[in-house]
Amino acid sequence: MKQAEWFFDFISPYSYLQLEQWERLPRGLEVQCRPVLLAGLLDHWGQKGPAEVAPKRRFIYRQLLWMAAKQGTPFRFPDAHPFNPIKPLRLAVALNSESDAIREIFRFIWRDGHLPAEDPAWQTLKERLHVSDAMLQSAAVKQQLRDNGGRAIELGVFGVPTFVADGQLFWGMDSLDFFLDYLKDPELLLDPEMQRIDRLPVAAARQVET
């Protein structure tokens, strides 16, 4: 059976849109969902988040609305973004990172437009999923989330959503077709030009002032 890992963060609407296309995954693919804190990945690789660059933020928010409509996926931004995703990430971990639970949390945020804040809607979601505050604060849940982040960095994951299969990374919701083609034909990455670009030298490096 083919296996893959899927790294995601609830802060990422692209992760939501990709999850809503999972019916396209081949039957028999076993996917291990791994909630991770995107901010930790960005810090590790020295990157800014997409929403931390003002003109980019405006563009991607518009693009997301367009992509969701094009995809036919119900979509509504919560009242603020970025938000702190720790609570929904821990909620997913407490639910053993099961895809059905993850989908429900994503839809709470990105379909229904709720912030994961301590309000009646959030409380209702926790009750519906049978998770208590004590479970979210457990040492085991916190450690598993940290372990997921360590696993992501170990594999070279630099953003979300990312599928990883056979050590190969497929980042971004728009990489889904690339990932599906790879699953059909893993020799895709053995193409001579694919091999050549893996060895391309860097001809110039940007100097970052400190």
Image (cartoon, rainbow, N blue to C red):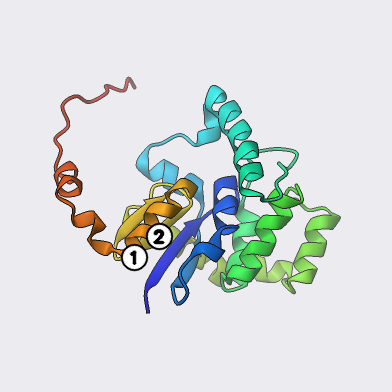
Q: Is residue 13 above or below residue 22?
A: above
> Foreground: 116 or 69?
69
Query: Looking at the image, which residue is at 78% across and 53% down?
Result: 118
Name of the residue lying farthest toward the right: 120
Q: Residues within 10 Å of mark 2 (few under 14, many from 20)?
A: some
In the picture, the quarter occupied by the N terminus is bottom left
Residue 180 numbered tag: 2
x and y, in percent, of residue 128 in the image: 78, 70
Query: Looking at the image, which residue is at 18% across and 56% down?
Result: 190
x and y, in percent, of residue 158 in the image: 39, 47
Relative horizontal placement of residue 146, taking residue 113 as reference (left or right): left
Label 2: element kind: helix
Query: Looking at the image, which residue is at 42% across and 65% down?
Result: 5
- Residue 152: tell me if it is visible: no
Name the quadrant containing residue 183: bottom left
Q: CA distance from mark 1 to mark 2?
A: 6 Å
Type of amino acid under label 2: Leu
Question: How many labels, in total?
Answer: 2
- Residue 121: tell me if it is visible: yes
Residue pointed to by mark 1: 184
Name the quadrant containing residue 208: top left
Asked whether the beta carbons under mark 1 and mark 2 sit within 8 Å of each other, the answer is yes
> Foreground: 58 or 94?
58
Name of the residue lying farthest toward the bottom: 1
Q: Residues within 10 Å of mark 1 (few under 14, many from 20)?
A: few
Relative horizontal placement of residue 171, taking residue 98 as reference (left or right): left
Type of amino acid under label 1: Lys
